[in-house]
Image: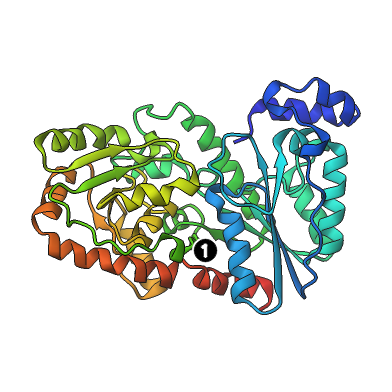
Amino acid sequence: MISAAAWLVSRTAAVFPDRFVRTFLPKRFRYRDEDVPPPPSSPGNEVRLYVGPVNWAGQGWQWARAAERNLSDVGAVSMAYHLGNEFGHAVDQSVPVGAYVASRGWQRAQREAVLSGFSHVLVEAERHPFGRVFDQTVAFQIRDVLSHGLSVAMVCHGTDIRLPSRNAAGNEYSPFRAGLLPSTPALEKAAIRNRALLDELGLPVFVSTPDLLLDVPYARWLPVVVDVKRWAMDSVPLERTIPVVVHAPSNSISKGSDLIDPIMTALDEEGIVSYRRLGNIPADQMSDAYRAADIVLDQFRLGDYGVAAVEGMSAGRVVISNVSATSRAHVRESSGRELPIVQATARELDAIVRDVVSRREHFQTQAVAGPSFAATVHDGRQSARVLAEFLGR
């Protein structure tokens, strides 16, 4: 998330030339001219899709590729600003955050390239598609795009639209309870503001996970996409005498690591499992982490599932997570498939892990369903079908 400092920088940039502003940027916003990529070229297809500007969990790039692979005559470009602390996900156009918030030259060139070379824009996380300069609102930039005849849709990723008070009210494990996340008040305000923007614009809206439909009931679920073949593994889980359990949270608080670490550490000390708690793993190394695992623990607070769980299923591992009945029901209704994630709250985790270890053949069967489910729901084909109406395919 771009901080309030970015707002101050963008206001300054609206007055002074780029070369002047760049010398006074805070260290994390500084960039060189050679670090700024050229504006995106038109794909040259009948449908030309621009996706940006966040690419969280690599999904902007994945949705762009899904549309290209599975829909007729579609070309796509994904763009994201980078802060330097991302996990190394692929993206077509990576823009330094300093240029995104402070370069009038970059913003002008980006806007002109998109307006002249693209037919559709998918705006991620209710962020400015062309940066923060000129003190323009997101709504202003989107209406500008619409006025030039392009079609626009919005896609929500999670923290941008998940209302903390809603999640906390119906979820005893919510990370938004009891002051666990200091950012909760800011997230509440942002979610309210972003929902108001969606209501105001009245454009097609997609959400990346089923649980977010509670926050935007008129949205459609756009499944996250993974490279299922890349994650495929020949090894069968639960054949080791002591199974290896991996937990690699992208955010330890929202994933509930504090709830499960003591439980898993105790099981490790008892010799039931070998528990490996990993952190800050680059995207290109996660497959190695899962290859070494029998059981993957995803999240135990939010009640939803995302990219990490899909990667674990694609790898044929036993995935354990706390996924709400609402999310599971929507998956069943949308895909006709049962979600092959072993259900467990933090309170149930000790018993569930012991059960997995004692009934290995049963849970190996459930793990076998993972790659098939991921290939059906999360390899990009279903996501392309969801995007098809917006793209006129």
Give the quadrant of residue 118: bottom right
Is residue 272 rendered to the left or right of residue 181? left
* Closer-to-camera residue (164/391): 391
Q: Position of residue 11 (x, y in %)?
A: 80, 28
- Which quarter shows the N terminus? top right
Is residue 189 rendered to the left or right of residue 360? right
The residue at 52%/63% (across/down) is 222
The residue at 77%/46% (across/down) is 130
Mark 1 = which residue? 222
For disc 1, the neighbor class at 10 Å (few under 14, some 14 to 19, many from 20) is many
Q: Position of residue 336 (x, y in %)?
A: 36, 76
What colour scheme has been applied to the protein in the rendered image? rainbow
Rendered view: 231 above or below 5:
below
Q: Type of residue at label 1?
A: Leu
* Closer-to-camera residue (270/241): 241
Q: Position of residue 260 (x, y in %)?
A: 25, 37
Give the quadrant of residue 256: top left
